[in-house]
Image: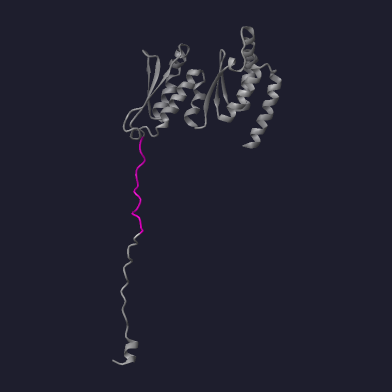
Amino acid sequence: MSAEAAATMDIETLPSEPKPESNSLPPKPKFEPLKAHEMSDGRVQFRKVSVPPHRYSPLKKYWMDIYTPIYEQMKIDIRMNLKARKVELKTRSDTPDISNLQKCADFVQAFMLGFDVVDAIALLRMDELYVESFEIKDVKTLRGEHLSRAIGRLSGKGGKTKFAIENATKTRIVIADSKIHILGSFANIKIARDSLCSLILGSPAGKVYSKLRQVSARLAERF
């Protein structure tokens, strides 16, 4: 065979198969997200909230308003145990998130402390909300008429002072005798608590209002 014939001869090449790389990893497995009852090994989780005597009538009146969002939206079972005087909550097989149980317990607890249902229900909707409680004696030891006057300063005429603090700090405040409960975000609770402490210590309402205006203006600039 001549050199010219060899030059004109077509050479057919087969595509070589790619060799599997020694370092390649198998594909990642895809797992379905665990349900609430599967996270706790199928065990049902409970929460119990005590009902104080003076909250029986409001609980009976607003029971359906409390029951509906907990049972239908949060998928948590709820019942009133009349013998133990507690509201009992437990997870179900279709509860989407294990944290729903604690949110519902916080919601019921807030109602027992004296908050309205429309205010307390925000605990189910938002994550960054808390309830903080303290007593007047934690700030200053007051007795007799001095204590009564301090409670009067906190509320103001017709609740005016309390409403002003609530609106300026975007919180909700319950004054139950010498106990004070504040519902709101962490930063807002701090501002409301500072204002209430100033009133307990004897600051006039006008001075507290002016300080609140400054703080509210700073908060508006920040967000």
Q: Toward the viewer: 195 or 104?
A: 195
136 inside magenta stretch: no
> What's the image's color scheme?
one colour
Where residue 42 appears, as percent x and y from the top left, is 31, 32
- In the current view of this chain or complex, which residue is farthest to the left? 1
| Front-lying residue, 12 or 135 | 135
Seen at 63% across and 17% down, the residue is 154
Instruction: Spot the residue most to the top.
Output: 144
x, y percent for residue 78 = 38, 23
Direction front: furthest residue? 22
Quadrant of res 49: top left
The number of numbered discs placed on residues in the rendered structure image is 0
Instruction: Give the quarter of the figure containing the N terminus.
Output: bottom left
In the figure, is residue 127 to the left or right of 203?
A: left
Q: Quadrant of the C terminus?
A: top right
At 52% from the left and 29% from the top, the residue drawn is 129
Q: Position of residue 128 (x, y in %)?
A: 52, 32
Quarter assignment of residue 193: top right
Say above or below: 52 vs 35.
above
Judge whether residue 5 can be spotted in this image: yes
**Residue 186 falls in image quadrant:** top right
> Can residue 164 be seen from the camera position used here?
no
**Residue 168, relative to residue 35: is it above or below?**
above
User: Which stretch is magenta?
Assistant: 23-35
Q: Is the magenta stretch mostly helix, strand or loop?
A: loop
* Image location (x, y in percent) of residue 104: 43, 26
In the rendered image, residue 25 lying in the magenta stretch gets the answer: yes
What residue is at 40 percent from the left and 17 percent from the top? 86
